[in-house]
Amino acid sequence: MAAQLSVNLNAVAMLRNRRNLPWPSLLHLGGLALDAGAHGLTVHPRPDQRHIRFTDLQPLRELTARRGVELNIEGYPTPQFMELVSQNRPDQVTLVPDDPSQSTSDHGWDCIAHRDFLKSIVARLHQVVPRVSLFCDPDATEQQLEAAQDVGANRIELYTGPYGVTYDNAEAARSELSLLVRTAGFASQQGLGVNAGHDLTVDNLPPLVAAVPNLLEVSIGHALTADALEFGMTETVQRFMAACSGSQSRS
């Protein structure tokens, strides 16, 4: 079974925010992505609103609800973030341990050190959303995955950035992939679903989905948006959907 594709709209929003104009339109491009077969949309509303704005959330929630697909909101659980989740009730929340000054997510949770904090947050989230996922290091230990299960998470999202940057080094790619396989195995043993995201492309996705057969969902923004500049959103999503099913890119 192919991993499902959630299209991350942050890069589109960042381009829009360069001007005080309503284009490129998140709703239009998000709709094109869904028309092309994507199973959902992902957004990461950071406190400084440098890409997704808080006002984007309700229209995107209405779009995904109308289409019967999923909205995934990711972020660090500040009081403001928790309120946004409560107002918009996404299908999934992905918690990341980001500092507000970070340009992008670059590490997973220490679920052991933050066990009590995460348990409280996850319990609150489960009052308004059906599924909570925790951003997870590619080399997370079995004990970390046990803690993720203990705090009440439904899934983890494997941080695939270290795998993504090995695009020109096959040996390093195999090494990073082996870590992801091991961590996905630990997650499965704990009854946790497995998502993945960060620097995934049409070229490195097929080896990942082949090696991690329990992969449920990938969230992709940067590479997908870059490819859309060349191929258009519709064809790009179709290419990524093929990659999610294990087909290699012919570009």
Image: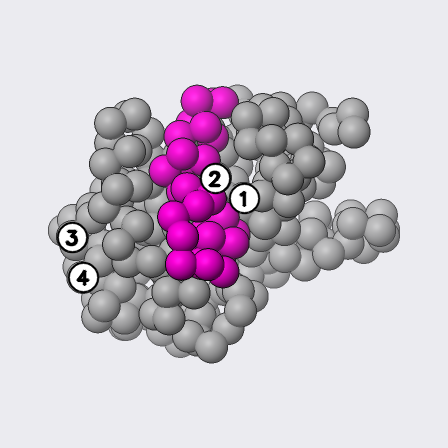
Crowding around mark 2 (Cα neighbors within 10 Å: few <14, some 14 to 19, many 20+) is many
- Residue 17 magenta: yes
Q: Is the Cβ of the residue at disc 4 closer than 8 Å to that at disc 3? A: yes
Q: Which tag, 2 or 3, sits closer to the chain's start? A: 2
Q: Which tag, 1 or 4, sits closer to the chain's start? A: 4
Q: Kindly state the secondary structure of the residue where label 4 is placed.
A: helix
The circle drawn on residue 220 is 1
The circle drawn on residue 83 is 4
Which residue: 28% across, 49% down?
A: 57
Mark 3 is on which residue type?
Gln
- Residue 57 magenta: no
Which residue: 60% across, 31% down?
A: 232
Crowding around mark 4 (Cα neighbors within 10 Å: few <14, some 14 to 19, many 20+) is few
Q: Kindly state the secondary structure of the residue where label 2 is placed.
A: strand
Q: What is the C-alpha distance between the residues marked 2 and 3? A: 22 Å
Report the label total.
4
Q: Which tag, 1 or 2, sits closer to the chain's start? A: 2
Range drawn in magenta: 10-37
Q: Which residue is mark 3?
A: 87
Q: Position of residue 104 (x, y in %)?
A: 53, 64
Q: Position of residue 22 (x, y in %)?
A: 38, 48
The circle drawn on residue 7 is 2
Which residue: 59% across, 41% down?
A: 224
Query: Would residue 66 appear left or right of 49 to someone viewing this image?
Result: left
Q: Is the Cβ of the residue at disc 4 closer than 8 Å to that at disc 2? A: no
Q: Which tag, 4 or 2, sits closer to the chain's start? A: 2
Which residue: 74% across, 28% down?
A: 249
Q: What is the C-alpha distance between the residues marked 4 and 3? A: 6 Å
